[in-house]
Image: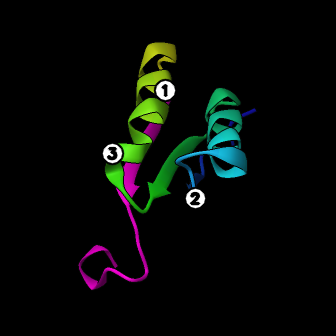
Amino acid sequence: MATGRVMLITGCSSGFGQAAALHCARAGERVFASVRDLAHGAGLLALAGAEGLALGLGGLGLADAASC
């Protein structure tokens, strides 16, 4: 059940981060998924788009001051 919150989930290019982002979005939550390299998040964004999920993608790398 959706709560109306927006969730920020990091490490979404693969593994647990990606699984968590998809799980929450499929549960009806609005998800902002972050990855260090936007190219690595293309698969997640494509999946979310195909399913009509409320999921946004952004780059967030702590070593890259421009992304913070």
First along the sequence among labels 1 and 2: 2
Dot in front, 1 or 3? 3
Q: Which image quarter is the N terminus in?
A: top right
Helix, strand, or loop for circle 1? helix
Dot 1 corresponds to which residue? 48
Q: Looking at numbered disc 1 in the image, what kind of residue is underneath it?
A: Ala
Q: What residue is drawn where x is 51% and y is 26%?
A: 53
Q: Which mark is residue 64?
A: none
Place of residue 52 in the rendered image (x, y in percent of width and height, measured from the top left): 47, 18
Place of residue 19 in the rendered image (x, y in percent of width and height, measured from the top left): 69, 39
Q: Looking at numbered disc 3 in the image, what kind of residue is underneath it?
A: Ala
Dot 2 corresponds to which residue? 11
**Distance between mark 1 and mark 2 Cα atoms:** 16 Å
Give the left or right position of residue 59, taking residue 20 as reference: left
Give the left or right position of residue 15, taking residue 44 as reference: right
First along the sequence among labels 1 and 3: 3
Q: How crowded is mark 1: few (under 14 residues within 10 Å), some or many (20 or more)?
A: some
Q: What residue is drawn where x is 34% and y is 51%?
A: 38
Q: Looking at numbered disc 2 in the image, what kind of residue is underneath it?
A: Gly
Q: What stretch is highlighted in magenta?
A: 53-68
- Quarter holding residue 18: top right
Place of residue 23 in the rendered image (x, y in percent of width and height, measured from the top left): 71, 35
Dot 3 corresponds to which residue? 39
Place of residue 2 in the rendered image (x, y in percent of width and height, measured from the top left): 68, 36
2 shown above or below 47: below
Q: What residue is drawn where x is 49% and y is 26%?
A: 48
